[in-house]
Structures are given as C-alpha cells and as structure tokens.
Image: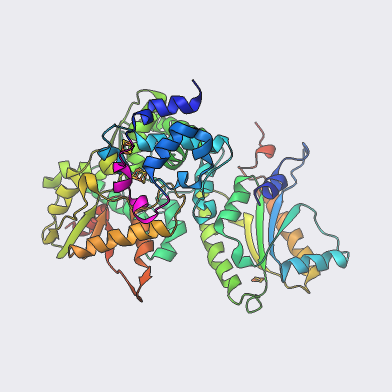
Amino acid sequence: MDTTTAYLKKNRVFNCLECGKCTAVCPISRFNGTYSPRRFASRGIFYGSGDIGKDNLLWSCLTCKQCSLVCPANVNYSEFMRDARVEARAMGFSGNPSHSGALHYIMEMTASPDLKQQRTGWITEDLKTCKEGEILFFVGCLPYYQDFFSKDLDFSPIDIAKDSIKILNHLGIVPVVLEDERCCGHDFYWSGDLENFMKLAELNLKEFEKAGVKTIVTACPEGALTLKKLYPEQFGAVSYSVLHLSELIAENLDKFKLNEIKSRITFQDPCRLGRYLDIYEAPRKVMSAIPGAQFREMQRSGKKAVCCGTSAWTNCDSYSKQIQSWRLKEAKGVGADILVTACPKCQIHFRCANKNEENGKNIDIEIQDLVSLFASALA
Amino acid sequence: MSTKLSSITKKKTSEKKFTPRIVVFACNWCSYAGADNAGVSRIQYSPNFRIIRTMCSGRVTPGMVLKAFKLGADGVLVSGCHLGDCHYIFGNHRAIENFERTQAIIKTLGLEEGRLRLEWVSAAEGPRFGQLIDEFVGEVTKLGPSPLNNSNRRK
Ligand code: SF4
Ligand code: SF4
Ligand code: FES
C-alpha cells in the first residue's frame, strides 16, 4: 500500500459519500468558491497525493474541524489535510506563509539546541515565578508576538502572560517559567513539518523533566492541545497533566473577589479549545462570574463556532479577512461591546480585521483575552 | 531568493579562524550603487559579505532578515538611501519600523543586537560603504559565530 492510500485509509477518506455537508459548513468555502473539502476528498481518492499536493488550496484549510462534526461518514478531514501536507512538503511545496515566513523562521530557530533565548524579560517584580517546581506556566509564543505585533495592532500580547501569572499568584501558586522554553511546534505539526515538530517537542520535554514539572498551565489553546495530546501521541505517555488557565480559574472561582465590569460580552470559542479539547463550559463559567458583565451567546458558538480565519501562519488572504469581518459583525450583532477570546492568535487575527475598512468605517469592536478580562476584574 | 540565500550562508571551507559570513541587503538606488562605487574606486575592504540587491530598503521584511539568520548568517546589514532620499519616498521609514521589530525579535531569540544593523549609504559614498563593512565585520568577529551557524559549531 503506498503512503497516499495508507493515509486516506487511516483518515477514512474512502468512506466519503460525497454528500457535500463539509463544504456547506466550511468557512473557507463560504467565501472562496474554489475551495471545497468534498472535492479534495474525491480528488485524494481518484488522483492521489500528487494531485492535491500541487494545489495551493491545500494550505488554505484551517484544520478547524468544523466539517468533521457534520460528516456522516466520519472522515477525519483535518488529519487528512495534515497528512497530505506532509506529502506535499516531500514534493517541495509549502503553501504561502504569511508575514514572509517570519514566524516560521522564529519557530525553526528555536528548534536549534544551541540557542539561549532571552524570553523572560517581561517578568516584573510584582510577578512571582520560579525556576523549578511542580506547576509550570507555559508562555508559548507570546514574547515573540509582543515583538512582532504589538506596534501594528495596538495591544500587548505579553500582557496575557502577565495577567496569567497574576491570577496564578492570586491562587497562591508560584509557577515555573522556563528560561529556555521552546515553541510548542503546533504550527509545524499542522503544516506537515514533522521534523521540526519533533525537534521542538524533544527540547521541551527535556526542559519539563529537568524542572520537575507535574502540571502545566497555559493560556494558549494551541499549546494546551500540543502538550496534552500531540506530544503523548508521538512520544507515548508523558509525566505531566495539562490545564488551560480557564479550567483552573473555573475550578477555583470561590477564591476570587471580583469588581464589577459593566459591559456586554460575547465569546469566540477557539477551535483548539473547543472542538479539539472539548472545553466549552469553563470559559463561560469564568465570564459569568464577573459581576456586571452581561454574557451574550453568538448564534454560531460552542461546537459550531467559526474559526478565526487563519491557521499556522499560512495562506492568510482576502478570504481569511472576510471570515474575520463576518465573525466580528456577528459579535457586534448580538450587541456585544467586547468580543472575548481565549487564544492569543484569535485576538491577533481579529484585531487585524478590526482595522479593515468597509464603506469607510471599520467594524470597531473591542477584543480582549479571557485571562486579561478576568485579571482586570480582580479586586 | 531561497537558493540565493542558502548558497550564501553555506559552509565553504573548514577554516580554523572565525571569519564571519555577513548578508547585506542593499537598495537598488543608493546603497547598491554605493557598493559599486567602492568597487569602481578600487577601495580595499573586507570580503566577508554577500550582497543582495532589493528595490528599496523598505522591501526588506523581518522575514527576510530572520531567514538569513536561520540559515546561519553571523550578521545582517540592511542598507538604504539617506532619510529623505528614498526613491519611493517613505521606503526607508518603513525600513526603520521593520528594523526595530526585527531587532526586538533577535534579542528575544538570544542573538546579540550587534548582529543586525541598519545604515544609510548614498550612491556617492563608496569609501563610506567600505569603511562600514570593515567596521561591521570587526564587530561581528568580536561577537563570534552565531549560535545558528552550524559550520562554526565546535563540539
Ligand atoms: S477543517 Fe475547517 S477549513 Fe478545513 S475543510 Fe474543514 S471546515 Fe473547512
Ligand atoms: S461531509 Fe464527509 S461524507 Fe460528506 S462530502 Fe464531506 S467528507 Fe465526504
Ligand atoms: S530606494 Fe533606497 S531606501 Fe528606498
């Protein structure tokens, strides 16, 4: 059996009934008529990886898993795309990285064992952290996002990390923050670059072990998914458990005293937190605990939430922007003043789209991370 | 672009003494002509750099600079027209923005700030171009090989 057949089988692509439900719910297909997951599935079956590998649209799939939820044949579409990308890479294709590949180069450089990063400069004196211990706060790419995006998007991604530490300290937790934490490798995994993914994973696992970590808390859903599910998939059982910060807050809500925040808020379920990790309740609990905040649900929320439009820093195009504007308008439509999200990348993408002008006006809605919103309510 | 960059940073000889490999991005209208001027005037200066011509210094994105570092460059110099002279009016102001962003990233990555430089060289400043390269090569030599420069890794 050649590799194409093997991965089509593994992801049950041969079961496809050509019903087209996937295309009906796919956010990319909604705006880009030339992209259709149904068609990709049939092309995979009839023409193999050579045909789909050459197609640049292969890199447009957000691996958001929206389609898998409606598929009557249980096709694992996002994994199918990932496997097809591994093959496409072997043929020399790699999609169109956004920002001229800057973020990919950063991730790749952190895979070099000789690098000694300077990534903890943001830890101010009021934030208590340590170097060894049982609970680790996984910062993720935030220091690099701070360098790269803070000027253009008028916000400070690193504040998400600061607010996270503040909340942890409030619970009496002094978390480990690693001096030389590496990128988790999420984006390499989903864009089919397994070699770099494995390098990063090995470096991280070594650091976790050295610091004696038993529990990892992170404010990034992609990091949570990668550490919780993808590392064990590749390396077998791991010696730590993983929590998204929203889960930890939700479990300990009685330990916080909160000030009023008078505003109407709605929530963007990040695909990795929702459809991949099945965490829907925790963030909602956290938000409804804030006095004065009126929570309003968007129509497409929870399992049906729309992805933020770009993934793994590839193929960000006008269709991505259309998805984002559509989502921002939906948030505005339910009367929300603040669109809350629990993923730094969602926020970056939405903030970018929020600057778009349509008919001379931008959509203009406030966007905030769940962690920062909660920290701002802390009494 | 990709083949060009990787051939520049590829290991050539197994030299014992550290000779830095530097990538220079020079804008077509001023700095590249400045480098030409240095050559035409037979100015003697360090040969440890490879030059890439771009239309404008504003064209040099953080991605391009980071790629050079990823491939093992020990230093990167971005060079454009003097402020006010850019042939696309505000290109070199964009270059400053890009430079500041890239510099911040380089620092977080743990590379020394001195490995990245932004300079203005006009078409008439051949001697200055040579001097600048000498200076930069000296500085990078002092810093030693980049941790990402595999050919210089001693293990
Ligand atoms: S994973 Fe998301 S973007 Fe990809 S085909 Fe399915 S619905 Fe569309
Ligand atoms: S929803 Fe499933 S069965 Fe239907 S076309 Fe898409 S992949 Fe095939
Ligand atoms: S043309 Fe030289 S800097 Fe713009």
Magenta segment, which residues?
A: A18-34
A284 magenta-colored: no
Q: Is residue B91 toward the left or the right of residue A164 in the image?
A: right
Q: In this orientation, does residue A88 appear?
A: yes
Q: Is residue A362 toward the left or the right of residue A248 in the image?
A: right
Q: Quadrant of the C terminus of chain A?
A: bottom left
Q: Position of residue B114 (x, y in %)?
A: 62, 56
Q: Residue at x 65, y 42 (%)?
A: B149
Q: Residue at x 72, y 71 (%)?
A: B30
**Depicted B12 relative to depicted B23: above or below:** above
**Depicted A90 relative to depicted B125: above or below:** above
Q: Position of residue A228 (x, y in %)?
A: 32, 33
A22 magenta-colored: yes
Q: Position of residue A77 (x, y in %)?
A: 36, 36
Among the 4 quarters of the image, the one containing residue B26 = bottom right
* Colouring method of the image: rainbow
